[in-house]
Each structure stands twice: as C-alpha cells, then as structure tokens.
Amino acid sequence: MKQHPSYWAFVVHRVSGVCLAAFLPFHFWALGNALQLESFLAWTQQPLVKLGEWLIVVALAAHLGGGLRVLALEFLPWRDWQKGLAAVAAALTLGVGLAFALAL
Amino acid sequence: MTFRGEARLWIAQRASAVVLALCVAVHLVTIVYAVRSGLNAAEILARTRGSVAWFAFYSLFVLAVTVHAPIGLRSVLGEWAGWRGRSRDFALLLFAAFLAWIGMRAVLGVFA
C-alpha cells in the first residue's frame, strides 16, 4: 500500500495540514502586530526565514491540491481520470512553489 | 461522540474546505503578487486598511480556518496519537476559540 501514489497523497495532505495548523497562530500573531510590521518584514529577509516561508507556501499549495483531490473523490461520480488526481495535486504544488520561489 | 455529531463534523469539514479552496487560491495569488512587487509595510497597510471587501474576505477566511483546522487535527490526534474522547474535543474547542480570536485580531490589525 505504501508504494501507491494515493498513500503518499494522503500523507502529504495530512502532514501539510498539521504544519499549517501549527504555523497559523504565529502568522496571525505577527499580522496582529501590524504597527511593527516594518521591523518584522526586515526580520523575514534572512535566508533561513525565506526558506521557511517557501516551505509553508508549498505546504499550503500541497494541502489545497490534496484537499481538492479528496473533494473530487468524495463528491464527483467515479471516473477513471480520478486516478490521476494525485499527479494534478503534485503539479499544482510544484507550480505554486516555483512561482513563489521566482517572486522571492 | 454520537454518529450524528460525527456526521455534522464531517459536513462542516467539507463545507469549510470548499470555502477555503477559493480563499487559499486567492491568498496564494495575493502572496506572489505582494512579494513580486516588493511591497513594504507602509505600502501594504495603505492598500489594505479601510478596504471593506478585503476585510470581509479575510474574516470569512479566518472563520473557515477556525472550523476546518480543529476538525482536521481531531482526526490526526485520534488516528496517529491515539487521543480520543472528551478531553481531545475540549482541547480542540479551546484551539478553535484561540484561532478565532488571534485570527480576527490579525484581520482587524491589517484591514480595519
């Protein structure tokens, strides 16, 4: 079973969801201190912080792709193309990851 | 939890997922645009503050996250950490309340 793409789609969806849930309070806390936003943005210029930002944006895209896959599997009538949904989710994640990396 | 309660959580998780799919897509485009433009804090806040549409959009985003994240964590805690029962649900209810509070604090800070 662990060889199957659907298993890895499940694991990536779940792990990215846990990472996002852990990240959200820090994200909200930083945005809530909008008056100190300039110094916070300066702090985010560090390479390691940029790497962390990239990873969390990729996790967000992966969770979106994985979530759309789950919704399509559960709510749309079964069709053969649904076997390829894990690849579509991976492509979406890669696309967003590249777009954000180019924008950084 | 009763079967009916579990079914309600399942529906809430899927309904919030549909809302979040739209919100996250918009958010990702906004992030890439803001980073590409190299906006500084003053420019960001000048664009966001007083915008009723963005305030409403991100309020809906926070509300959907407040529903979605704790229900998702509930499955993970039950299946991967073996934590079930009322103590788990109570802890997640507190987490949901915390997310709603700190999330709306962020929305008010950036958009109000």
Image: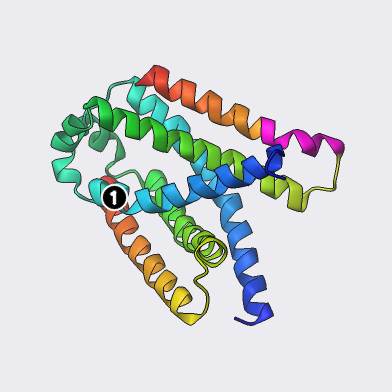
Magenta extent: A80-87
Q: State the residue lying farthest toward the top.
A: A102
Give the prevailing secondary structure in the magenta stretch.
helix
Colour scheme: rainbow
- Tell me residue A57's x, y (percent): 43, 35
Residue B8 sits in quarter = bottom right
Q: Tell how many labels.
A: 1
- Check the image and report above or below for B73 versus B55: below
**Residue at 25% across, 52% down:** A29
Q: Amino acid at mark 1?
A: Phe
Residue A102 sits in quarter = top left
Side of A3 where B67 appears, left or right? left
- Check the image and report above or below for A12 versus B61: above
Side of A41 where B83 appears, left or right? right
Side of B24 where A45 appears, left or right? left
Q: Secondary structure at mark 1?
A: helix
Quadrant in which the C terminus of chain A is drawn: top left
- Tell me residue A46's x, y (percent): 21, 27
**Residue at 50% across, 41% down:** B24
Instruction: State the residue position of label 1.
Output: A26
Q: State the residue lying farthest toward the front.
A: A2
Side of B14 where A22 appears, left or right? left
Q: Which sits in the foreground, B6 or B32?
A: B6
Q: Chain of mark 1?
A: A
Quadrant in which the N terminus of chain A is drawn: top right
Q: Which sits in the foreground, B46 or B81?
A: B81
Within 10 angstroms of label 1, few (less than 14), some, or many (20 or more) residues? few
**Residue at 58% across, 52% down:** B17
- Residue A81 part of the magenta segment: yes
- Tell me residue B65's x, y (percent): 46, 56
